[in-house]
Image (tube, rainbow, N blue to C red):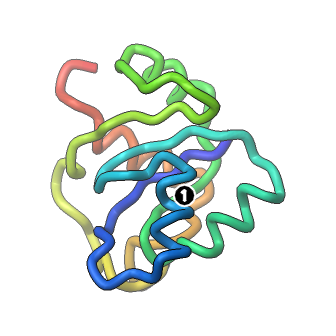
Amino acid sequence: MLGVIRIRGTIHVRHDKKLTLNILKLTNKFTLAVMKDQPSVRGQLQLIKDFIIWGEISKETLEVLKKLKCDEGSVNSYRLHPPRGGFKKSTKRPFPQGELGYRGEDINKFIMRMLPEGV
């Protein structure tokens, strides 16, 4: 399973990228979408890599996310808080210089920082 978090807004963004964000149910900043790892999804993620953080979600993180309310559908989508402690790097540069792009297993730590208190 892949976890995708939208970090940036859509001011001055091309129409095809906005459409891809909407298809993946990433309509607002700090929205997490959990989806199956498929080649078609990875292609869409490459198109919008300048707006998102994404990586593989562990089973433990999925168990914690089940406690949150989500929008049911083909893609589970969750509203999160901004990360506790803030962003460690720029939100305008790709990983490893910034926060954007593919994170691998480190996405789990990032999600835990964005969950509301008490979850």
Q: In the image, is residue 30 above or below residue 63?
A: below
Total count of labels? 1
* Quadrant housing residue 87: bottom left
* Quadrant housing residue 35: top right
- Three-letter amino acid code of the residue under disc 1: Trp
Residue at 16 percent across and 54 percent down: it is: 85
Residue at 65 percent across and 73 percent down: it is: 46
> Is label 1 in a helix, a strand or a loop?
strand
Which residue is denoted by mark 1 in the rendering? Answer: 54
The location of residue 53, given as percent across then percent down, is 47, 62
| Residue furthest to the right | 39
Q: In the image, is residue 96 above or below residue 110?
A: below
Q: In the image, is residue 60 above or below residue 81?
A: above
The location of residue 62, given as percent across then percent down, is 54, 26
Q: Nearer the viewer, residue 95 or 30?
A: 30
The location of residue 80, given as percent across then percent down, is 29, 40
Residue at 41 percent across and 24 percent down: it is: 70
Q: Nearer the viewer, residue 23 or 106?
A: 23
* Quadrant housing residue 74: top right
